[in-house]
Structures are given as C-alpha cells and as structure tokens.
Image (cartoon, helix red, strand yellow):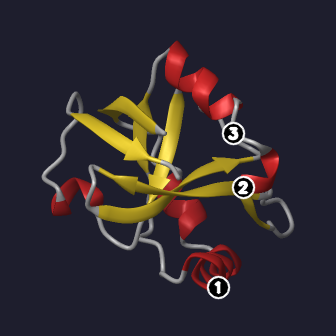
Amino acid sequence: MEIKGIITSGMGKGTYFMSQNFYIDQFFEKLHFKPFVGTLNIKIGPEEIACIMDIPNEKFGIVHGEGKFGDVKFIKAVLNGEVNGAIVFPAKTKHTEDVIEFISNKNLRKYLNLKDGNQVSVKID
C-alpha cells in the first residue's frame, strides 16, 4: 500500500518524546535502528486515512510507554522509496487523524531536502 501526503510542520514535541531512552531502546530492539530525535509530519487525505484504518491490528508493533508517556503503535514503512523507517501512532497525541508521523534513523528534512508543502510517498507492506 502506498500513501501520499504533504510535509507539514509539527508542534515540536516529537523531539522530546523520541529522546526518551525507553522509547529509543524499544525502537532499536524492534526496528533495528536508533531513531532520529524527531518525527516527520505528513498530512494525508481521507482516502489515505481510510487505508490506514483498514490495516489489520496484527500488522502493528507496539512500544510501551513509562510513567506519563503513553504506548506507541508503529508499522514499518519506506519513505519516498529510499528511507526505511516506520509510521508511529502515539496513544497520546495532539495530531488529528489526517497527520501521520514517520521516524527513521535520519534527519529526513535534511537528508531528503524536504520542506513544508513537499509531496512524499510512504509505502507500507
């Protein structure tokens, strides 16, 4: 399945959450990379939202939060056909369902020279 969307600025909270050691350790164990401290926010349309909602629950992994930090569901994905990573779905989020968050071991804005408004694609197996 391929999802297309537009890069959008986030709230700046992804850096804080992705810098927590218990998240870093679990993502490394489950995805085999240390995530860059931050997420790439991608605004998607209604068709893409429906596609994500149709993904069977057993396809998702889970990273467990600690204390005030909630669990995070994730699914492996590839950004623009070249960067392996995952889409993350934090249990506690301020994003609406039309914004997904992508993580990888790279600063994706710098690595792919991405700016707000650029179109990207995310492939989920």
Q: Taking 70 as reference, is 19 left or right?
A: left
Q: How many marks?
A: 3
Residue 97 visible in the displayed image: no
Residue at the limit of the structure toward the right, as seen here:
67
Please state which amino acid type lies under the numbered disc 3. Answer: Ile
Category of crowding for the residue at label 2, using alpha-carbon neighbours closer than 10 angstroms: few (below 14), some (14–19), many (at least 20): some
* Corner quadrant of residue 115: top left
Residue at image point 28% right, 38% down: 120
* Image height of 60 relative to 33, above or below: above
The residue pinned by badge 1 equals: 29
- Tell me the number on the disc at residue 55: 3
* Image height of 5 relative to 77, above or below: above
Q: Which structural element holds mark 3?
A: loop
Q: Which structural element holds mark 1?
A: helix
Please state which amino acid type lies under the numbered disc 1. Answer: Glu
Residue 94, image x, y percentages: 64, 34
Residue 14 visible in the displayed image: yes
Comes first in the chain, label 1 or label 2:
1
Residue at image point 45% right, 25% down: 44
Residue at image point 80% right, 56% down: 70
Please state which amino acid type lies under the numbered disc 2. Answer: Phe
Q: Gap between marks 1 and 2, in whole Å?
A: 15 Å
* Image height of 64 relative to 33, above or below: above
Q: Nearer the viewer, mark 1 or mark 2?
A: 2
Residue 84, image x, y percentages: 39, 66
Comes first in the chain, label 3 or label 2:
3
Residue 98, image x, y percentages: 54, 24
The residue pinned by badge 2 equals: 60
